[in-house]
Image (spheres, rainbow, N blue to C red):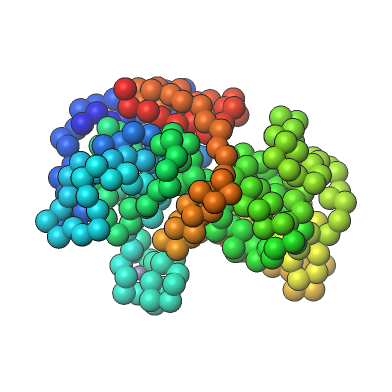
Amino acid sequence: MRATLLSTAAPIAEHPLRMVDLPDPRPGPDEMVLEVTACAVCRTDLQIVVGDVPARLLPIVPGHQVVGRVVELGSEMAGWAVGDRAGVGWLGHTCGACRFCMTGRENLCPTARFTGWDIHGGFATRIGVKAAFAIRLPERADTDLAPLLCGGIIGFRSLRVSGIAPGGRLGLFGFGASASLAIQVALHWGCEVFVVTRSRDEQRRALALGAAWTGTYDDPVPTPLDAAITFAPVGEVVVSALRSLERGGVVAVNAIHLDRVPQFDYDLLWLERQIRSVANYTRDDAAELLRLAGEIPIVTTVDLYPLEEANLALARLEKGELGGTAVLVPT
Ligand SMILES: [Zn+2]
Ligand SMILES: [Zn+2]
């Protein structure tokens, strides 16, 4: 198979991903192999490639928002057939036996393995996946579905962690790919959504999607928020969000990597306000988000790149030059 391989993390200007030929993956008994048709690019891919999130396996094929077709099944496989469409997300494996896995919190499994971090990902023409972690997909174009498989699912988990109830007042701080998917679910639930971002383009996009109000970090949100989700990978934003909260409200921090959170007065947290991080997702989160994606339906905006141009797609993501989620397509 053809794959883009990361051998050493480096600044994106040095083109750390190299196009190589690798042996095709062979399925273990409970695994299957997909021919990749689309793989969306996530900020976490960028962070692994440049070293902000240390790689756990090198060399590694990044990419964890993968859509493909089953081409080979392991010997003990049931429930999937050759030719089926399937998705592969960040959650590649959990133990199934620890206290977290046994209580519906497999996202916290200490021995979980992640696609494109511990296991070769989808910046390739083929990928192997544990069948139990493959995601069933609604009938949509593969390139439109790919951005849902991390940005969509983690955005959805952030909504759950924030505790936002139907009809509540929700703040979104930062408005990239994941936020533009989460807002569609929140509006579907009848929430009033306030979007805070420096970028005028992102403000316009938020209003077009149905935000009640947009502003910058200097503008006070006009009404106290029942819940807020921070998407910007900046600690100050967590404090901004906290400052906008109603008593009893929750800030959900959607970031695998964040610089430090600045010191703040306890008054901001007082009255049972909470700050919670959002880590990974469960298969239930994935199934529910994909169901909603078909029902709402969730609209995605994509910029297509040939697989060979993975470095360019990552560079544009880093510079904030993408009009939508970058999706790599094997040619
Ligand atoms: Zn476990
Ligand atoms: Zn991701």
Give how far across and how far down residue 170 sits, in percent. 73, 56
82 is higher (above) or lower (below) than 302 = below
Residue at image point 35% right, 74% down: 98
Name of the residue lying farthest toward the left: 75
Residue 283 visible in the current orientation: yes
287, above or below 68, in the image: below
- Percent coordinates x, y for residue 255 in the rendering: 56, 51
Answer left or right for 35 relative to 144. left
In this view of the protein, which residue sits in the foreground, 85 or 162?
85
Say left or right for 154 vs 86.
Answer: right
On the question of residue 260 being in view, the answer is no
Quarter of the rendering containing residue 83 = top left
- Taking the spot 74% from the left edge, 66% from the top edge, the residue there is 249
Q: Residue at x 37, y 52 (%)?
A: 136
Number of labels in the image equals: 0
Q: In the figure, residue 38 lies in which quadrant?
A: top left
286 on left or right of 277: left
The residue lying toward the viewer, choosing from 214 and 315, is: 214
Residue at the image position 27 percent from the left and 50 percent from the top: 129
Q: Position of residue 122 (x, y in %)?
A: 33, 39
Depth order, front residue of 210/110: 210
Q: Position of residue 111 (x, y in %)?
A: 33, 64
The quarter of the picture where the C terminus appears is: top left
Left or right of 160: which side holds 113?
left
Ligand 1 quadrant in view:
bottom left
